[in-house]
Amino acid sequence: MSRENPKVRDALKKRYKMRTLGEDGRNIVVSIPRMVIEREAERREITIREFLERFRGIAQFDNFDGVVYTFEPLEELKVD
């Protein structure tokens, strides 16, 4: 049974398989489409490699259907 979110219209959609990772399959892994990373890097006018080195993906979920993924800068290591 497939549930469509009526609030998401005209969105690009691609299905991905999930796989387990780690001891006893404690983590479930789903790939982020390359197109998403390319778009985010382009918006920031940096290369994909720079984006991957400088940002991390954040999954937000709780009181709504689905998951919203955003990206935030990695914190610089502070050396005293």
Image (cartoon, helix red, strand yellow):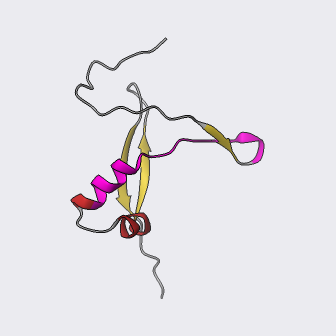
Q: Residue furthest bottom?
A: 80
- In the depicted structure, whether residue 1 falls above or below residue 53: above
Q: Nearer the viewer, residue 79 or 49?
A: 49
Residue in the image at 56% along x and 34% along y: 17
- In the depicted structure, whether residue 66 falls above or below residue 21: above
Q: Position of residue 3 (x, y in %)?
A: 41, 15
Residue in the image at 71% along x and 48% along y: 22
Residue in the image at 63% along x and 39% along y: 19
Q: Does residue 17 appear left or right of residue 62 in this picture?
A: right
Q: Position of residue 25 (x, y in %)?
A: 72, 40
Tell me how many marks there are: 0
In the rendered image, residue 35 lying in the magenta stretch gets the answer yes
Q: Nearer the viewer, residue 40 or 61?
A: 40
Q: Residue furthest top?
A: 1
Q: Nearer the viewer, residue 58 or 11?
A: 11
Q: Residue furthest right?
A: 24
Residue in the image at 45% along x and 80% along y: 78
Q: Which residues are magenta?
A: 23-41
Q: Nearer the viewer, residue 56 or 10?
A: 10
Q: Position of residue 61 (x, y in %)?
A: 43, 35
Snapshot quadrant of residue 66: top left
In the rendered image, residue 27 lying in the magenta stretch gets the answer yes
Q: Position of residue 41 (x, y in %)?
A: 30, 61
